[in-house]
Amino acid sequence: MEKKLIKLTINGRVRELSVKPNDLLLNVLRNDLHLMGTKYGCGIGECGACTVLVDGQTALACLILAITVEGQEITTIEGMGDHVQLHPLQESFIEHGAVQCGFCTPGMLLAGEALLKENPCPNEEEIREYLRGNLCRCTGYAAIVKAIKSEAKCLSVNTGTSSE
Ligand code: FES
Ligand code: FES
C-alpha cells in the first residue's frame, strides 16, 4: 500500500511522517514516534489503555487511522507532564496511590484531564461514568476517582446568610 506524507501535531509539535492509509494512530505514536506512554491493551476499543486527546476530547488511538487526524491537536501522556515537571493530576495520582502497575495510568490521566476541562467540579458518579471506557485491573478505581476529585475546582456556594 502506498505511503502518504502527512503532518501530525503531537504535544504541540508538528511531525512530518510517511504513513500507509491503514496505519493506526496507536502504531504511529509507538512505533514511528517512540511515544510509548500510549499503551496497547486490547486493540479493539474496549480497555482505554490507548486513550489520547484529539482536540481536547478523549479518543482511542487503536481505532483511529493516523491520516484522519491530520491538522488536529493530539495530546499523549508525554505532553501532559514529565518526571521533572509533573502535571498536578499526575501528582494527585501519586499522592492518592492511584498508580499500581501503571498500565492504565496514561489513559486514566488523559481522561481525567479531559473531564476536568469539560466539568471542573464533577461528583464521584460523574467521574466514574466518564472513566467507564478506561479499565483498571489493579486499583479498584476508588483511588483514581479520589485523585481526580481532589483536583476538581468547585465554587463554594454562597447561601446569602450571614452570622453577623
Ligand atoms: Fe485501544 Fe484497548 S488498546 S481501547
Ligand atoms: Fe494496573 Fe490500573 S494500575 S491496570
Image (spheres, rainbow, N blue to C red):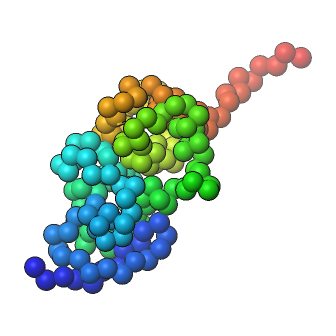
Q: Is residue 78 above or below residue 49?
A: below
Location of residue 1 in the rendering, given as x and y in whole percent from the top left corner: 10, 79
* Of the pair 80 and 163, the residue shown nearer to us: 80
Location of residue 56 in the rendering, given as x and y in whole percent from the top left corner: 44, 57
Which residue is painted at 48% across and 33% down in the image? Answer: 98
Q: Is residue 58 left or right of residue 121?
A: left
Q: Is residue 37 above or below residue 20?
A: above
Location of residue 5 in the rendering, given as x and y in whole percent from the top left corner: 27, 84
Q: Is residue 71 left or right of residue 117?
A: left
Q: Is residue 85 left or right of residue 109?
A: right
**Residue at far top of view:** 163
Can residue 119 be seen? yes
**Residue at far front of view:** 101
Which residue is painted at 59% across and 42% down in the image? Answer: 91
Q: How many marks?
A: 0
Which residue is painted at 36% across and 30% down in the image? Answer: 138
Query: Where on the picture, by quarter, is residue 162?
Result: top right
Q: Is residue 71 above or below residue 47?
A: below
Which residue is painted at 55% across and 37% down in the image? Answer: 94
Can residue 149 be seen? no
Q: Is residue 160 left or right of residue 150?
A: right
Query: Where on the picture, by quarter, is residue 23?
Result: bottom left
Which quarter of the rendering shows the C terminus?
A: top right
**Residue at far left of view:** 1
Location of residue 17 in the rendering, given as x and y in whole percent from the top left corner: 31, 79
